[in-house]
Image: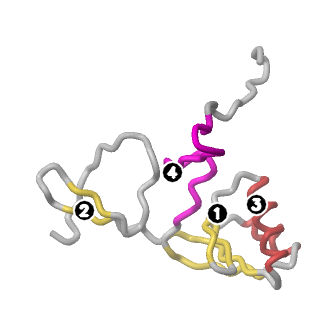
Amino acid sequence: MDGEEAGLFLSAGAPLAHGQCLRAEDGRVVRILAADEPLLHVRCASPEALCRAAYHLGNRHVHLQVGEGWLRLLDDYVLEQMLQQMGAEVSRLFAPFNPESGAYGGGHHHSHGKDAAFQYAPKLHLFGQPA
């Protein structure tokens, strides 16, 4: 039924994406609909400027949605000012947010050859703990 609320218990893994469908044990299909969120929509005068903006946002570990000639991120006044100082055109909108899952997320397999794959997890340093 359209609009029926459901509770889902899912194992850890890739985030659910807008439009994705899940099949329940009873055979019903559930389509995921992302809620609109307050976002910043970023455009730049050149591809290089857009890459620079993405670099600086990524350096701050900001979740980004990447589109053809634009970036989207959750509304943040400080980041908006930074982007404007870099010359970016920043506007506000309400839309579903589908950020990139990241280099280690989304269940993507990374390979450097026939038998090579990541054999390690990202290493984090805990201050005050032995490395």
Along the viewing direction, whichever of 62 and 103 lies nearer the viewer: 103
Along the viewing direction, whichever of 120 and 44 lies nearer the viewer: 120
**Residue 11 on image: x %, y %:** 36, 40
Q: Which residues are magenta?
A: 98-118
Secondary structure of the residue carrying tag 1 is loop
Residue at image position (79%, 78%) is 47
Residue highlighted by disc 1: 64
Characterize the local packing of mark 2: few (<14), some (14-19) or many (20 or more) Cα atoms within 10 angstroms: some
Q: CA distance from mark 4 to mark 1?
A: 14 Å
User: Who comes first in sequence, dot 4 or dot 1?
Assistant: 1
Q: Is residue 25 above or below residue 79?
A: above
Q: Which mark is residue 106?
A: 4
Secondary structure of the residue carrying tag 4 is loop
**Residue 100 on image: x %, y %:** 59, 60
User: Who comes first in sequence, dot 1 or dot 3?
Assistant: 3
Q: Which mark is residue 57?
A: 3
Question: How many badges with numbers are in the image?
Answer: 4
Residue flagged by tag 3: what amino acid is it?
Leu
Q: Are marks 1 and 3 in contact (CB under 8 Å)?
A: yes
Q: Quick check: 40 left or right of 15?
A: right
Residue flagged by tag 4: what amino acid is it?
Gly
Q: Which mark is residue 30?
A: 2
